[in-house]
Image: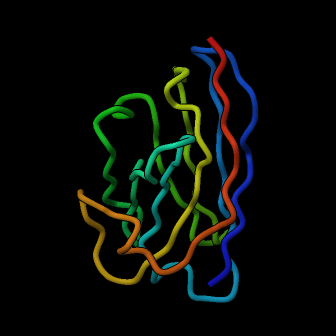
Amino acid sequence: VQLQASGGGLVQSGGSLRLSCAASGGTFSRYVMGWFRQAPGREREFVAAISWSGSRTYYTDSVKGRFAISRDNAKNTVYLQMNSLKPEDTAVYYCAARLGVVSSTSTPAEYDYWGQGTQVTVSS
């Protein structure tokens, strides 16, 4: 499956962005979808994940209550709505896909397919 992330940009602290990730080349509804991010000099970290149907979602503690992951299987697209953004959210954001069961503790190694990344910069 091929993934194409979009929607990043520059936003002031407290602002919002909505990331999208369009999938092609596979049966989208079979895949658990995740968002990860990587800041300069840091390892790639888990942000959020969503089950095949969208009924289960998981978030890293630092974004709970501010970010929301969702998916539209008819459009083969997963979204990440980011509200109340903080400078520490600045990173390249990646969408990823995997077969299997969604987990509350996801690592990059568990995901099989990756998008190219989209830059999110939050100014203070």
> Dividing the picture into quarters, in which one does residue 76 lie?
bottom right
Say whether residue 85 is left or right of residue 119: left
Relative placement, left or right, of 11 versus 31 is right
Picture mark count = 0
Residue at 66 percent across and 37 percent down: it is: 120
Q: Position of residue 35 (x, y in %)?
A: 49, 55
Residue 89 x/y as whole percent: 52, 31
Residue positioned most to the bottom: 26
- 118 or 29: which is nearer to us? 118
In the rendered image, residue 14, in percent from the top left (x then y), is placed at 57, 14
Between 85 and 42, the one lying in front of the other is: 42
Q: Residue at (47%, 49%) from the top-left corner?
A: 69
Quadrant assignment for the N terminus: bottom right
User: What is the x, y in percent for residue 33?
Assistant: 47, 67
Q: Is residue 101 left or right of residue 72?
A: left
Relative height, residue 40 to residue 25 (above, below): above
The residue lying at 56 percent from left, 61 percent from top is 95
Residue lying furthest left: 104
Q: How does the figure colour the protein chain or chains?
A: rainbow
- Image quarter where the C terminus lies is top right
Q: Residue furthest top?
A: 124
Residue at 41%, 51% (x, y): give it: 45
